[in-house]
Image (cartoon, rainbow, N blue to C red):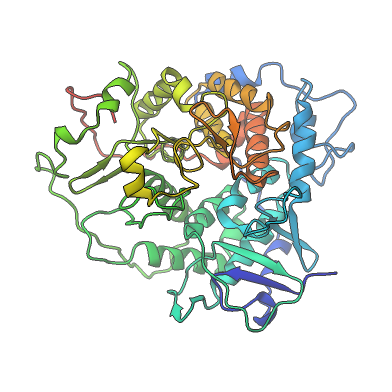
Amino acid sequence: MEPLGLRAVGSHCSLSEMDDLDLTRALDKPRLKIERKRSFDERSMSELSAGYGRHDGVHDSPRGRSVLDTPLSSARNCFEPHPMMAEAWEALRRSMVFFRGHPVGTLAAVDNTTDEVLNYDQVFVRDFVPSALAFLMNGESDIVKHFLLKTLQLQDSEKRVDRFKFGKGVMPASFKILVKPPSDEWPLLTQGSGGLFFSVLTKSTGDLTLSETPECQKGIKLILSLCLAEVFDTFPTLLCADGCSMIDRRMGVYGYPIEIQALFYMALRCALSMLKPDGDGREYKTEEYSHTAVTRFNVMPDSIPDWVFDFMPLRGGYFVGNVGPAHMDFRWFALGNCVSILSSLATPDQSMAIMDLLEHRWAELVGEMPLKICYPCLEGHEWRIITGCDPKNTRWSYHNGGSWPVLLWQLTAACIKTGRPQIARRAVDLIESRLHRDCWPEYYDGKLGRSVGKQARKYQTWSIAGYLVAKMLLEDPSHIGMISLEEDKLMKPVIKRSASWPQL
């Protein structure tokens, strides 16, 4: 039966109740072919592409699929693809969601081993990013463009939680296809970082006919109006509550977490490249700290935890998890540091230092299953106070130091950009040794990531897509241009490092 409605989680109505905007007209316009820039050392490109060629007798079809209906990434290269690739593509296609005959996203998980659906039967903006990149790298852009156009349509709808109305422009975090949309249903809003991912993903398509549509231009401006609104704050960054990042439960990640700031920076740069001048000339203002302050954040040396001194190698560094007045979270967060590299928030030297640390602390940060979401974990009294004794976030589990296979694609992209693909290959080998045998779980538990997560969903779509993206990046490193920004030297301030402390 064809689904009749598309519901935004956080939207007051379904698509079937809204005026059907003819957004799909953007897909009918002539498409511009944009050459992507490579934002990594050309020497690494020659190393990765050495010996890569096409299979004899196999040619890509004009529609972006080979004549044998194998993924493009497999047909492009001369080496035999890993058997997991075919299984991963099959699982990814099973998760596809259709609305009125068009693919509009992928479900969070398709786990037939449990009757508990929870919210894994929804299309999440954040979770769809690796799926979108996999399809784009495989020459299948329609699902990505339909997804972006439908989220724009949902962004324009009214969103409520109980009697509270959200500000105009809030991007839906997720939506769900309804076969029979109920008239009295009031959906709930979940994670709220969808808008930042929308801007980045729109640029990843490389299609100006999409980004220059009035609907897309309006959507990006609405996102900026929310993120850059004048508030009573002293930072040019994005203030966040606990649980609003990839770590969406209480874990003490509030204030200015590196994950959100790096993503915010990347989204701003993507928006800057896509927005057309409209003569509005609006400026967004914020306060800044004085550059003459000796200890501008009022962070005392005694607040540095003991583990940092043992964790830091002689060569290497990382962006700390959070910085605020009299508060510094020294935990290492995988996503924030990887996005810092991809967005060029990190300088080339800082990017190399992040990779140096990862190699030196492989056992702690990677272990037997890539990649730790954060390090170290919270435990004991600290865990009880910060998490409220969260039974899901026990030590070395889930968000509290668990290992998440989806982070493989960000790690691989960062490795390629820094010219160190051998690190990514090592991580991929670990993934291929067991991920498919474990039925593509959402996360792993344990200090080394040895056990499948105690509440991990099987056949998690972003675990599947993350593996595919990592493999395609290694097979064809030119794909890095979809998800990496070149350093903007005009925007980079001169950074002076202290000689008395390792780079953090």
Work out whether residue 340 or residue 284 is closer to the camera in this orientation and state it.
340
Is residue 233 shown above or below 403? below
Q: Is residue 354 visible?
A: yes
In percent of the image, x 66 and y 30: which residue is there? 471
Is residue 406 shown above or below 113? above
Q: Quarter holding the N terminus?
A: bottom right
Please tell me how many numbered marks the rendered image carries. 0
In percent of the image, x 52 and y 51: which residue is there? 200
Left or right, residue 98 beside residue 266: right
Rendering coords of residue 42 (x, y %): 53, 23
Left or right, residue 317 beside residue 76: left
In percent of the image, x 52 and y 23: which residue is there? 367
Q: Quarter holding the C terminus?
A: top left
Rendering coords of residue 124 (x, y %): 60, 57
Work out whether residue 396 or residue 82 is closer to the camera in this orientation and state it.
396
Is residue 412 shown above or below 35? above
Rendering coords of residue 127 (x, y %): 59, 51
Q: Is residue 490 visible?
A: no
Rendering coords of residue 478 (x, y %): 61, 32
Where on the picture, by quarter, is residue 297? Answer: top left
Where on the picture, by quarter, is residue 272? Answer: bottom left
In percent of the image, x 68 and y 61: which residue is there? 146
Left or right, residue 70 beside residue 120: right
Work out whether residue 22 or residue 461 is closer to the camera in this orientation and state it.
461
